[in-house]
Image (tube, rainbow, N blue to C red):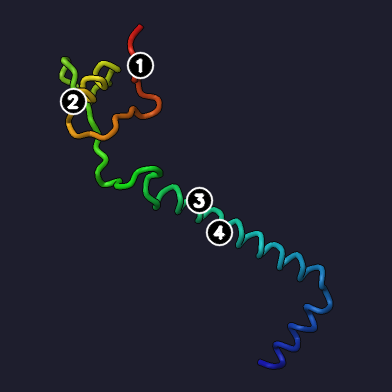
Amino acid sequence: MVNDLRSAWRAISRSPGLVAVIVASLAIGAGANAAVYSAIDALLFRGTAGVSSPSALVDVYTSQITGATYGESSFPDFQSIAQAGLGLLCISCPEGQPAHSPA
């Protein structure tokens, strides 16, 4: 094993440019790997930002006269739910869903 290490050291000392490229590519790969896993951890595995108890979040759906179970909620629906005093701390509408008063 000592002979193998000596042979490897001689090969490395003959081409320091190649060693620099190998070390740089390993460092870039490790950094990119850490960045991707940090982003995935923050987006998928951490709690919802700004919510102290995510287990208390609920979905509120509006049923329609046509029989559809999960219909779109209008702004008056949100007002009615908020005024009903159902113990909800905050009522919000997901982005891209209609939550405006019809003009």
SS class of the residue under badge 2?
loop
Q: CA distance from mark 4 to mark 1?
A: 42 Å
Q: CA distance from mark 1 to mark 2?
A: 21 Å
At x 26% / y 22%, what residue is drawn? 78
> Tag 3: residue type?
Ala
Residue 69 is tagged as: 2
> Tag 2: residue type?
Thr
Tell me if 99 is positioned left or right of 88 in this view.
right
Rendered location of residue 14, percent (x, y): 84, 77
Q: CA distance from mark 2 to mark 3?
A: 36 Å
Q: Quadrant of residue 92?
A: top left
Rendered location of residue 3, percent (x, y): 72, 92
Which mark lies nearer to you, 4 or 1? 1
The residue identified by callout 4 is 34
Which mark lies nearer to you, 1 or 2? 1
Rendered location of residue 102, percent (x, y): 33, 9
Quadrant of the image containing the N terminus: bottom right
Residue 100 is tagged as: 1
Mark closest to the chain's N terminus, 2 or 3: 3
Q: CA distance from mark 1 to mark 3?
A: 33 Å
